[in-house]
Amino acid sequence: MTFKELYNEVVSEAVKKDPSKLKAYDKLDKYQLDCLLYPEQHTVIWRLKPCPCPPEKQRECEASCQYGAIRPGMEFDDEKCVGCGECVDNCPENNLTDNRQAVPILNAIREGRLVYAMIAPAFLGQYSPEVTPGRLRSAFFKAGFKGMIEVALFADILTLKEALEFDANILKDSDFQLTSCCCPLWIAMIRKVYNKLMPHVPGSVSPMIACGRAIKTLYPDAVTVFIGPCIAKKAEARESDLKGAVDYVLTFREMKDIFDIMQINPEDFDEEDREHSSRAGRIYARTGGVSEAVKTAVSRISPDRKISVRTECADGVKACRNMLDRLLRGETNANFFEGMGCVGGCVGGPKAVIDTEKGTENVNVYGDKAVFESPIDNPYVIKILNRLGFDTVESLLGDSEIFTRHFE
């Protein structure tokens, strides 16, 4: 039995009952089964079987990880792994995969727990062109989720926080800010390779973490599940200072597998409309979206600023490194820098269902359909902030437990 066959069989059983109690699985690959049943006990990247490559080839693989996360014997170090997925894509034996978390999520749903789906801004069009946000929300209800929250609403909030940080701290032409609330690969690159730039990164969590923390604040017993195109989010959810906000992370492909197994076709459902995000939060999913959102917010917060937002963006690890190298050499006049680890941004993530170009087009269309242009215009931002104990937008500059990160 291949891993994919085992995965499909175990997930199918988890829809109906607890697969860990099925004796039939005793004859299957026990390590792979244990990974599927108890993913929280295993690393972000799994080695499916002992590595068949000779020692010299294994050493090449170890050296190829720029974060030093591959140990001798092709073991993985979760403290160093950022979930970039390069090793999975480049393994000559196709012997690596990302951590799969469907089984405990389905167990929680079957047990009647409050399981919330947190959908990434890149979701539009991932399941079919006919799957609107309202239909997707209805599909999640059918699958047993308590609700679906668009993480774009929290991208709105983090946009305001970053705009306020910029307005407060960028006071002369030599000042600059690096965005801190988008891509975990970008943040990992700065922390591990360009650490001298960390003072220019404001302490903001990502929209995913903010959404998870907000749900946990309002509903302490909730189970939070982020769904997006990114393996790196699985690593981010496990970071020591962020752990506990997001219980599980699924990719769009994994969620599609669950829908297929449960025979749920999102395009067949009625609309369940609850659009709460502005255009700014929705365009986070593509390259340049964060910069555009922050620039618009700064202009609304402080229209008479003498120093405007001058943005520079890069997507893909190589382009991000080139941009940061030029910044260190003083070869740019930008004062706000956005980096995305995947070409195209989140829509180009390794586990997206549709191609980057189509994903970008969908994100732009969805952004243009937003009722509100900027987070400052969005009444739902104020509403959720008030529920979380924030009296004003300006209070986001404070050291909150929900939206602030203290980088180690």
Image (cartoon, rainbow, N blue to C red):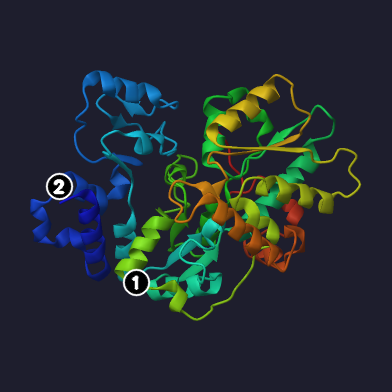
Q: Secondary structure at mark 2?
A: helix
Left or right for 24, reference 388 = left
Q: CA distance from mark 2 to mark 1?
A: 28 Å
Callout 1 crowding tier (Cα within 10 Å): few <14, some 14–19, many ≥20: few
Q: Residue shown at 58%/25% (left/top)? A: 195
Q: Residue shown at 84%/34% (left/top)? A: 171
- Residue 365, numbered circle: none
* 213, 256: nearer the viewer: 256
Determine the residue located farthest toward the bottom in the rendered image. 270
Q: Residue shown at 29%/33% (left/top)? A: 92
Q: How many marks?
A: 2
Kind of residue at badge 2? Lys
Q: Residue shown at 43%/50% (left/top)? A: 351
- Residue 112, numbered circle: 1
- Residue 30, numbered circle: 2
- Residue 243 visible, this angle: yes
User: Residue 356's spot in the image, x, y percent?
Assistant: 53, 50
Kind of residue at badge 1? Gly
User: Residue 383's spot in the image, x, y percent?
Assistant: 68, 67
Q: Is residue 398 above or below residue 255?
A: above
Left or right for 52, reference 392 = left
Q: Is residue 87 above or below residue 233?
A: above
User: Residue 99's spot in the image, x, y percent?
Assistant: 33, 46
